[in-house]
Amino acid sequence: MPPKVGIIAGTGDLPLRLAESCRAQGREVFAITFEGENENAALAAAGIPSAKVGIGSVGKTLLLLKQHKCEELVLIGKFQRPSLGSLKVDFRGARLLPKVARATGDDSILGVIMAEFEKEGFRVVGADTLMPKLRADEGAFGKHTPAELAQSDIRMGRAVLDALGPFDIGQAIIVERGRVIGIEGPEGTDNLIARCAPLLHERGVGVLVKARKRGQDERADLPAIGPRTVQTCAEAGLAGIAVEAEGAIVIDKVGTAAEADARGLFVIGFAAKS
């Protein structure tokens, strides 16, 4: 029997899709979701065995995962980082807090958390190891392709993200006519798009570019897009989306391509730099 999968679930569609994919493969799952703004209520609503804990309840989380005999763990979904001052922690969380406080960015924090799980004997794996064909393919997803101006903006966005990667700053950027409009911070891609929409000079020109950070641990927090990203970009007036092939996750490739075609946007996967 394949090992039981524990899902550390943030918000969004991916945690439920992962749980359903595991079940289709005959794998048992147990999910942990979190109180407040990080709660993913869709898991319980879909009948996925799960528990809700405080995001600082590290000891309780580990105990639940062991009680449910989970062997592999996946961290998946969107997580809003709480301020350290507002974080309510249990004893195990208090021991971990100094390491989290010293972490310099999202990747560093995730590294601390994954190391803690591994110390307890769990094997942390990437979602793409359990969900076939989750990563972005190279080339166009629908019938639209970027014009020459958009291709230039994509190249610029890739160069900026590559330069910023070692500083653990962000995985997404919006560029319009050679001008950086905004770089993703802890707020996430949807909020980046909303923040940049009023700053765009012309509808149907700017592009969203997403790529891995250089040296990123690929078991968690890979850049992701899906039909909702296409909708948000269209409403903001962007021309399209470019993501790193094999370095980004696409939620519902068929639905993403269909939404792009319906909205008149391009969605492409670009090859990673060698």
Image (cartoon, rainbow, N blue to C red):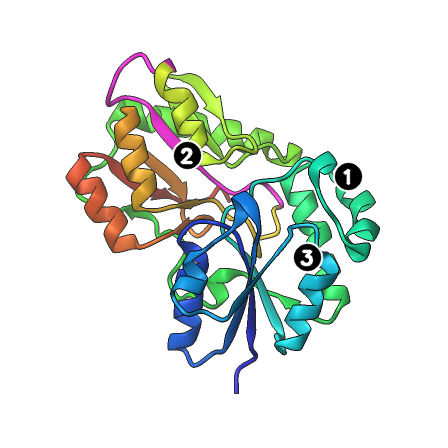
Direction top: furthest residue: 201
- Depth check, mark 3 against mark 2: the one in front is 2
Q: Residues within 10 Å of mark 3 (few under 14, many from 20)?
A: many
Q: Earlier in the sequence, mark 3 or mark 2?
A: 3
Query: Is residue 252 visible in the rendered structure shown here?
Result: yes
Most distant residue in the bottom direction: 1
Q: Which mark is residue 194?
A: none
Q: Position of residue 4 (x, y in %)?
A: 56, 77
Figure check: 147 above or below 126? above
Q: Residue 71 in magenta?
A: no
The answer to which quarter of the image holds residue 140 is top left
Q: Quadrant of residue 3?
A: bottom right
Residue 249: where, in percent of width, then height? 42, 51
Q: Which mark is residue 190?
A: 2
Cα distance between the residues tagged 1 and 3? 15 Å
In the rendered image, the vertical position of residue 181 relative to residue 81, given as above or below = above
Q: From what the image shows, is residue 166 above or below residue 78?
A: above
Q: Of helix, strand and loop, which one carries label 3?
A: helix
Q: Is residue 214 magenta?
A: yes
| Residue at which label 3 appears | 114
Decide: few, some or many residues near mark 2? Use Cα within 10 Å; few <14, some 14-19, many ≥20: few
Query: Which residues are drawn in magenta?
Result: 199-215
Q: Which class describes the residues within 10 Å of circle 1: few (<14), some (14-19), or many (20+)?
A: few
Amino acid on which the number 2 mark rests in the picture: Asp
Q: CA distance from mark 3 to mark 2?
A: 26 Å
Q: Amino acid at mark 3?
A: Met
Q: Nearer the viewer, residue 152 or 211?
A: 211
The answer for how far apart the CA atoms under marks 2 and 1 are is 26 Å
Name the residue that disc number 1 marks: 101
Front tag of 1 and 3 = 1
| Label whose residue precedes the other's in the sequence (1 or 3) | 1
